[in-house]
Image (spheres, rainbow, N blue to C red):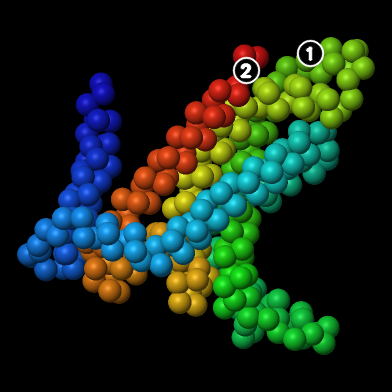
Amino acid sequence: MYLPALFMVSFFILYPFVNGLKISFTNWNGFSQTYDYVGLDQYTRMLKDANTWLVVKNTLLYGLGSTILQNAIGLLYALLLNQNIKIRSFTRTIVYLPVIISPLIMGYIWYFFFAFQGGALNDVLIFFGLEKINALGDPSINTWIITFVNTFQFVGIAMIIYLAGLQSISKDYYEAAEIDGASSFQQFKNITLPLLMPSITINMVINIIGGLKLFDVIIALTGGGPGYSSQSMSTFMYDLYFNRQDAGYAATQGILMALIILILSLSALIYFKRKEVEA
């Protein structure tokens, strides 16, 4: 019964990874039928390349920044919607709606808001007599805009998972806490958070992996520019392979990206798993 799943994992995950590892030791351009093995030259080149550390920094910002924001905002939404309010179903739908939109389309939607020429943000600034800003062209701003857009789109997933976790907590714990005179904050700290740890674990791992692989939104908003200022490791690999025909180096960057995702996601999984308690 395990064979179909084992075949799928081997064919779509293990084989591409092993093949990518092999290519990372070559000077293949991505198209020719021949290439030479160059040993660790590509890895040495990667470590000396200033662009490598720039895109790693950006990737960590997209991954960890989006994770923190999605979990914080998602939990706040879940706590709100766990109350008996009239617009609960409507609010839940509105918050979750961006999830079903393609990330590329979502990126273009926000592009027309932040664009320097004809963007809605600059139209508002001009209306109030202020100067236009080139938000997507400013390296100190555009990475945060990308992080915001990614958070806006996928916060609904965190909300739904947290809401399911909140609704699975027995009301008996809160009733007992109220009898003992515990405040709302004490109930949240000592009951809600500990029993919500399984949901926190799921959200943290999913958000870290998704944020570190970010690609579509970056392409739509900035194309990775100006220069390499907003590139992630995914867009950097794309540029190396298709624009610079440097597949060997692109594969090397891919191995680094896989290691970063593996280390961070496993660390988060192990850390939050240890925080989980029995209900």
Q: Is residue 177 left or right of residue 213?
A: right
Measured as percent of width and height from the top left, residue 228 is found at 45, 72
Image quarter of residue 272: top right
Question: How many marks overall?
Answer: 2
Question: Which residue: 31% across, 50% down?
Answer: 255
Seen from the viewer's position, the closer of residues 109 and 44 is 44
Amino acid under label 2?
Val
Measured as percent of width and height from the top left, residue 248 is found at 22, 61
Question: Which residue: 83% across, 25% down?
Answer: 186
Question: Which residue: 62% across, 17% down?
Answer: 277
* Vertical relation: 120 (above or below) 53: below
Q: Is residue 117 visible?
A: yes
Image quarter of residue 201: top right
Check disc 2: other Cα within 10 Å, few if <14, some if 14-19, many if 20+: few
* Vertical relation: 238 (above or below) 138: above
Q: Is residue 4 left or right of residue 100?
A: left
Seen from the viewer's position, the closer of residues 177 and 256 is 256
Question: Which residue: 25% across, 30% down?
Answer: 6
Measured as percent of width and height from the top left, residue 41 is found at 21, 60
Q: CA distance from mark 2 to mark 1?
A: 17 Å
Label drawn at residue 92: none
Q: Secondary structure at mark 2?
A: loop
Identify the residue under disc 1. Answer: 172
Amino acid under label 1?
Asp
CB within 8 Å, label 2 to label 1: no
Identify the residue under disc 2. Answer: 277
* Vertical relation: 197 (above or below) 30: above
Q: Is residue 216 visible?
A: no
Q: Secondary structure at mark 1?
A: helix
Check disc 1: other Cα within 10 Å, few if <14, some if 14-19, many if 20+: few
For discs 2 and 1, the disc positioned in front in the rendered view? 2
